[in-house]
Image (spheres, rainbow, N blue to C red):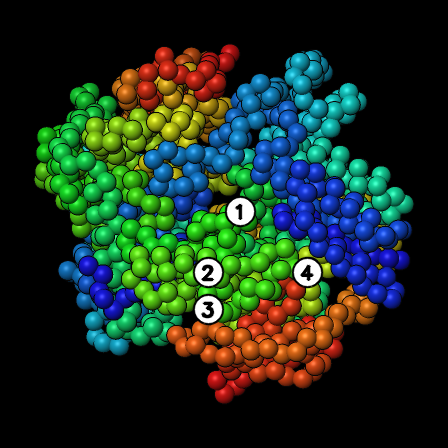
Amino acid sequence: MIPDTVDPITLEVIKNRLVGITEEMGAALMRTAFSPNIKERRDFSCAVFNHKGEMVAQAAHIPVHLGAMPFAVSEVLKDVEIGPGDMILLNDPFRGGTHLPDLTLVMPVFIKGRSPDFFLVNRAHHADVGGMAPGSLPLANNIFQEGLRIPPLKVVVNGELCPTAVALLEANVRTPQERVGDLQAQIAANRLGERRIRELVAEKGLPETRICCDALLAYGEKIMHHIISSIPDGSYSFTDFLDDDGISDKPVPIHCQLNINGENAFIDFNGSSPQVEGSLNAVRAITISAVLYTFRLLGPEGMPSNSGCLRPLHVITPKNSIVDAAFPAAVGGGNVETSQRIVDVLLGALAQALPEKIPAASAGTMNNLTVGGVNPANGELFAYYETIAGGAGGSPFGIGMDGIQTHMTNTLNTPVEALENVLPIRLHRYTLRRGSAGEGQFRGGCGIVRELEFLAPVQVNILSERRKRGPYGLAGGKNGLPGRNILIREGESREIPSKTALNVQAGDRIRIETPGGGGWGKPSDMDIDGCFTNEERP
Amino acid sequence: MKLLGVDTGGTFTDFILIDDKEIRTLKIPSTPQNPAMAFMDGVTRLKAKSLLISHGSTVATNALLEGKGAEVLFIVTQGFRDILSLGRQSRPRLYALHPERERPSLGEEKIIEVRERTLPDGQILLPLVEKEVNRVLSVAKEIPCSSIAICLLHSYANQKHEKLLEKIFLMQGYKVSCSSTILPEYREFERASTTVVNAMVSPVMGNYLESLEQHVAPSVLKVMQSNGGTMSSTAAGDKAVHTVLSGPAGGMAGAFHIARSMGIDRILTFDMGGTSTDVGLCDGSVPTSSQASIAGWPIKIPMIDIHTIGAGGGSIAAIDAGGALQVGPASAGADPGPACYGKGNAVTVTDANLFLGRLLPDNFVSAGLGLDPQKCRRAMEVLARKSGLEPYRLAEGIIEVAEENMAAALRVVSVQRGHDPRHFTLFPFGGAGGLHACALAEKLGMRKVFIPLFPGLLSAVGMLLASPMRDYSASFLAVSSSDRTNLDAAYKPLASQAHQEMLAEGVRPADLTLEYSLDVRYRGQSFEINVPYSQDFISAFHQKYASLYGHCHPEREVEIVTLRLKALGQGLNFEDLTALKEPSAASPPFIAKVIWRGQRQSWQGYHRGHLGIEEPVTGPALIIEDTATHLLPPGWTAIRHRLGHLLLEKSDDS
């Protein structure tokens, strides 16, 4: 319960202050970063933790980091001697990370004593961390192919950036200048957060601030209890599939059994596929994030994200599985693809409990495209990464949005004019994929067609999903159309697999067609205007 | 010359008329169905002729917000018909079961793709041939639209194809907005959006201004722009996208000019309205930024840099599921309004102020509103029971939460941008600003508050004082080098366009000021910083970067992204308006019963017009005037300046 000493007023004030700190950290990180993933796509998160390693506030940046940040801090607390002015860097998915491109930086704040009173943490998706392919999301079958693995490592010692640690990082990545720039942006964001935390403590006092942090966690827990108790008690289950792991052709099932019992939810993923050879494996942190995201959808706008919210969510994941991968699994796609399917599965189960609320499946893939090579304009190595949106699922509230980022990501596109100005790439088409939406009383959203021509020989990696099974419809709605990846070479088009690595020549084109969202409700109940954009155009 | 400032707001239309001898003000209800009615009514009532009128209007904003702009035909490079629908692919709310875009669709049939292609360096890959132009024209003729927006890829680098199409459509009598004219900067979605907004609002604005001009002839009509300057009404009819924030721009420009006339260069402005609060920071100039977005449409032209939050007098207080007291963003609006308006039961910030005796129920009568303390008390008691707080504590809590939110907004524009608020004066305006100003100042460590004369008419005053202004820009996109030849050459066309257009605005060359600046960043970044163009702009950039972010990279290459040129004519000085003085109301001081930090206290109350010039009044006290109340807490002193402004200062010993 909320400690008696904290009244509703103080609670609101302190909540807004702490969230404000994380948002300010995020704004600074975004504006000073060099990786497109951070500066344009906002693939990062910032958070404040208390002395016990509980997350008390996180800015709403990207859902896939939601429940994952506490794993990083607990690894740091477990393993590393830390002092004032130190910062710890990590990306090891099996020790507090998620997938290798996400670099997490943890900074302890010592107010008076010899142990940290707070931690500032930020996690950002770097454009490249080495490994077998530019962009570090390759068709790997073990973690070593995916890039440089960093266990909790003291990268700032007593306020000074450790040059040997930086040299190691630089030596193992394709665009070292950019990495160091991004790391400096992350350091500056944490320092900014530290300054603000010190100001807050100076104003409120340390004991009072601690009490407020506990109250905030209790507050998050209370809101989550409230959300869960609005779901009818019962047992619901659902299974959906990933197309394949890119190495074998076999579909990969994800199963969840959801038990709602009063104010608590038990989410059991037993029955899901064992971990796979390809890179679709999600570590437990990702699964937790996907679960928290899904329940947050049912909560009030502006609800906080903190460790308290997680307390009523009891997540059971079988070890060495697709939703709880263990060393030495490849995990690059766990974040960007499997996380989406976990949401689909959970929403499928919730739809049985709340049929008048839950939308049909959205695109269910981030359509990851990475391109790397030598830029002929300046002779420099480059690594470019983009994700392409798809259709949102139709819902009882209306048709699904066309061509929009859904669920675990909300990253921006790179403007065509920005892309063509700096890279040997030319866009030929970037439109909605008409006809791809699942029909229904409320149709899904249309996917996207994006066609790129390469002006130099480069290496291309595609990591995509929903190429075999379209996103499911609900309540009588039809499935959305699955996506397609097409290589166009010398006028000839041919379809290529959902997970592809290939070397292209100048003049080759890649055309990605992303899935449409599932429809909701019977198509015969459709409002005629709702369907317009879904008609095919020549 | 007689001068008239007219600010059409959502609720009221404000007039301020100045001639050699006197100043007259008028506040009448707006006529949202036809805003010209209130305008004309006011001008008639003031019986003034041959005026120089500066007008700020919500016509363009409302057309956008209410979706009542002109139907627009959008012409775009083949393969990119959906750039407006797709936007940046992101959803506005991260956690939504049913994500929605704010921006409405133009309609499938109103988009025409054209076969042509220009490259980033301006080279033409696929020429636009005559046959294709004719095809586009014949398709367009089938669609009942008279306003056209054209946005072709890379047209900022070469506007040839856009100009070709523009010429043909102009000849056919269409109204045309060309992206390479409206916003010649790279990033296609934002450029297209800005261009389409112009095409939507210009016909509406043009008709509106035309009808006003007919009515006020031979008076001269100028229109307030979002950048804090004015433009002729003819120009505004073609480039109405420049007027979407004209009201708030008037307020901030007014605050800046008045403060500067008092020798105060650095102010934090604070305009508290019913549903939202606008804050801004002036450090020697009225700052602009190009980050605005209205109704989901990004508008990337320079606008005065205000930060808006959803907290105002009408913000509703509620206890949420987790037991925290939330204030806003839901608002009771004007109807039903706060509980004390007598129509609804929502407890708002205004109710909290009334409950604590900080607002006097009778002081709203002149605005046509009597406040109902009983209704307010009952609503407060109901919510107090729900929250487990004493009613007075709840009321104080509502104000505390609202003020924390407003202080956070002030921190965003100051601390977060490298400014120390302690070196600034807080400049509140609007009816409720003065109630919260001193508390906010204390939260930010500020010691000075400046309350202008006519705080409720500040936007109209700002419109009077604004000078003719135009902003020009061009994408440059090159790493900086010591050779400035290219840079200087790229500025030339901007400067000659500025000279030409400002002359047309009636600005004499001798009165014309040109301010050159650059948007720059480290190569590889995506966010730029604007610095004045000088010999050592690069070191200025490193410095500004460091002050914003705490570190900089002197070893990295600096990239010039956009060239900017601001053309400014001569405006009016506030000193010229010596006729500005406030009406003296000879009402005696009174006693106000106020609850302050849990204690019932009797405070001294003053009518503003009754305060002696340069005679200090010490807090605690309430100072009231028509439609505004100012709270002077203990430890603060207020002095009424000779020109009528109030200067509030925190004493050293508290």
What chain does badge 4 belong to? B
Front label number (2 vs 3): 2
Q: Which circle's residue, 3 or 1, is located before the other in the chain?
A: 1
Q: CA distance from mark 3 to mark 1?
A: 23 Å
Q: CA distance from mark 2 to mark 1?
A: 18 Å
Question: For the residues marked 2 and 4, what is the alpha-carbon distance in whole angstroms?
Answer: 33 Å
Residue at point 21%, 37% (across, down)? A231
* Label 1 sits on residue: B335
What type is the residue that disc 4 sits on? Leu
What residue type is disc 1 on? Asp
Residue placed at 62% from the left, 60% from the top? B365
Q: Secondary structure at mark 4?
A: helix
Does A368 sit left or right of A319 as displayed? right
Answer yes or no: are tags 2 and 4 on the same subunit: yes
Q: Quadrant of residue B539?
A: bottom right
Q: Which mark is residue B356?
A: 3
Element class at badge 1: loop
Please name the residue shown 60% across and 44% down the image: B300
Mark 2 or 1, closer to the camera: 2
The answer to whether residue A443 is left or right of residue B227 is left
